[in-house]
Amino acid sequence: MPSAMEGSEGGEEGEILSYEETEDDNVSPTDLSELLKEGTKESHDRAENTQFVKDFLKGRIKKELFKLATVALYFTYSALEEEMDRNKDNPVFAPLYFPLELHRREALVKDLKYFYGEDWKEKIQCSEATQHYVHRIHHVGQHEPELLVAHAYTRYMGDLSGGQVLKKVAQRALKLPSTEEGIQFYMFDNISNAQQFKQLYRARMNALDLDKNTKERIVEEANRAFRFNMQVFDELDKIGRSLTEAAQDGGFPVHDGKGDLRKCPYYADKLGKAGTSCPYDAAVALAKQPLVQLILAACVAVAAGAAAWYIM
């Protein structure tokens, strides 16, 4: 899920994973925002150099893969916002609770309806890598709520930063409507100034009553969050390499007629969607039906007669 990124809009292929666009005044090296900035630099660098992110920034994002990334985001934010709601009155997290401004689940539902239709719930499922991420978020929210700060910081600050670059890349590369269907996830209608809001958010983080050990654990958890994201990136990259050209454009895959015809060359097996039929196999099976063969023979005869008449 490449939303956990930040950068200037002037260079989409440059460094995008730095959460601090400008230095805040009166920031101490022991403030949580500074500890997170310094403590996650290496994770930032590794995440922005994953193949999936590099391809995305260059506009080489496949529509089917973008849809799967949206699915992963839906499950991730559903878990995150469920745990945030659970801890909205907990002093270790309450100051960072901004549901109106930040929550993404409903926006992702709109995107999924756009890509998959009204029955989108029946067409999606949580991938293995995303499931690990979701399990960790639930564990943190229920047993170590102070670490929820790390997951909220990693996701939402990125959404308000580099995520805005990715929005433009996706809209252009996938030829999405100018009316912003399919990219509602990146739209924050209740935040008028993203930079000011990020400064407010960091100030709230710095004001949390946390000891040194807890701050160190939050930084460690933020790095863990980045690792979960990178695992999802790698999973998407592997799926992307398996997609045929037709599937990349959101169409049906095309069988080349080689190999075992019982195996459809689509990625459904990777997503656990058993029973997906292969268009090539279906066509071959249909052609073997006696009635169909008779009709085809008649058509060939008519075509041959017409050709002979034309030559004469």
Image (spheres, rainbow, N blue to C red):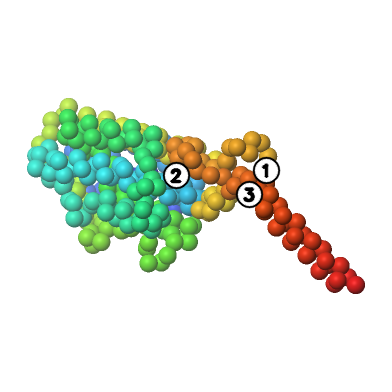
Along the line of sight, the residue nearer the viewer: 190 or 66: 66
> Dividing the image into 4 quarters, which one contains the N terminus?
top left
| Most foreground residue, 79 or 123 | 123
Disc on the earlier residue, 2 or 1 = 2
User: Residue 140: x and y, percent?
Assistant: 21, 32
Task: Name the residue tied to disc 3.
Answer: 286
Q: Residue 53 carries which label?
A: 2
Can the viewer see residue 44?
A: no
What residue sits 37% from the left and 42% below the top?
A: 125
Quarter the C terminus occupies = bottom right
The residue lying furthest to the top in this view is 213
Residue 63 in the image, given as x and y percentages of width and height = 48, 52
The type of residue carrying mark 1 is Gly
Q: How far apart are marks 3 and 2 (CA)?
A: 42 Å
Q: What is the distance, in whole Å, between disc 1 and disc 3 at their CAs?
A: 15 Å
Three-letter amino acid code of the residue under disc 3: Leu
Residue behind mark 1: 257
Q: Which amino acid does label 2 sit on?
A: Val
Q: Is residue 193 above or below residue 148?
A: below
